[in-house]
Image (spheres, rainbow, N blue to C red):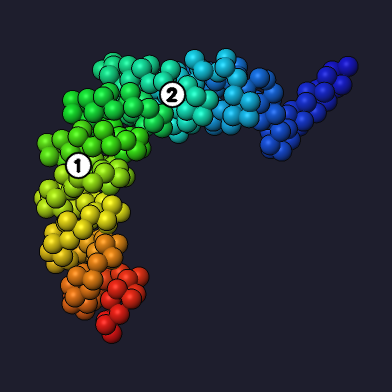
Amino acid sequence: MRAYGLFSKVMLSIVLFVFVLSGMWPLVLFAEDPLDRLDPNLYGTDTLLHSMYELEAYQPPQAVDRLIALIGHSDMDVARTAARMLRRMGRASTATNPAAQILRDPNRSVSSRSSAAMGLGELRHPGAVEPLGHALKNDNEEIVRMHAAYALGELCLGQAADALVVGIREDSSPLVRGAAVHALGNLWITSSQGLEEAILDSDAGVRVEAAWAIGRRKLTGLQVLLVAALNDTDCRVGAASAWALGKLENHAVCEPLTQIVESSCRLTGQAARWSLQQLGPVCSGWN
């Protein structure tokens, strides 16, 4: 009997070992209702994401409160996925205020507030402009302000521009200013406020973002500043400016681009050559 008991234990251990190695253990993890798995206290990031993907197929209204709670999750992928699902369910207006409360709560962790900021951006509701603008201006943590700036750009709303311009002009962190410039480049508005300062910023990374933003929005009124930036001491700024000039589709950019092709900064020269090729007939006289 003792031998039989020992044999049973050995066989059980072997079966469990094979069970784990074969990858069958997730079947146990994912065996229950995905709605019950939206509990961050019991399940990790992968399980939460997998559960939301399952729920996306039928979008049960019972999931709304649990999804709203996940907007403050420390993992930003979880927060953004939850917010995106709420938007697709038509619950963006319901989720905006709770997400804003998480963002404003100084007792929440930096990662939680950052997630809430990006979640508000995913909701794309006009009510998110005010809390994100407040966080961009007032949060003590650089990383939260940076994510608030990015989220304002995700809203794709013209009324987010004022808060971003303030961030560009007043924030002491180049990371935050760069994020605000990037976000401002996503807004299809006619004003160039904020970008004319950004292309002259003391930080090269901010100047690069400004050049990209000007090009994306095709702001011909800032062409002179882009031409001057071709000779920036940082080659990345010169290259971004050459790319942006090509996006303006203006014959007046052909000469400065042609002159900079042989720049001592190889990156700028390559970008200028690419822009000239893209402009095609606009700069047909270029050799």
Number of dots carrying numbers: 2
Q: Which residue is mark 2?
A: 92
Residue 32 image point, x, y percent: 67, 20
Left or right? Give the position of 208 relative to 12. left
Left or right? Give the position of 59 relative to 260. right
Mark 2 Cα-neighbour bin, 10 Å: few <14, some 14–19, many ≥20: many
In percent of the image, x 34 and y 27: which residue is there? 126
Question: Which of 20/176 is in front?
Answer: 176
Q: What kind of element bears circle 2?
A: helix
**Whether residue 10 is visible:** no
Question: Which of 86/140 is in front?
Answer: 86
In percent of the image, x 26 and y 24: which residue is there? 130
In percent of the image, x 63 and y 25: which residue is there? 58
Dot 1 amino acid type: Arg
Mark 2 or mark 1: name the one nearer the start of the chain: 2
Question: Which of 262/14 is in front?
Answer: 262
Question: Which of 234/89 is in front?
Answer: 89
Q: What kind of element bears circle 1?
A: helix
* Up-down relation of residue 281 to residue 51 (above or below): below
Q: Nearer the viewer, mark 2 or mark 1?
A: 2
Dot 2 amino acid type: Ala
Q: Which residue is mark 1?
A: 177
Q: Quadrant of the N terminus?
A: top right
Residue 55 image point, x, y percent: 60, 26
Residue 69 image point, x, y percent: 45, 18
* Up-down relation of residue 33 to residue 26 (above or below): above
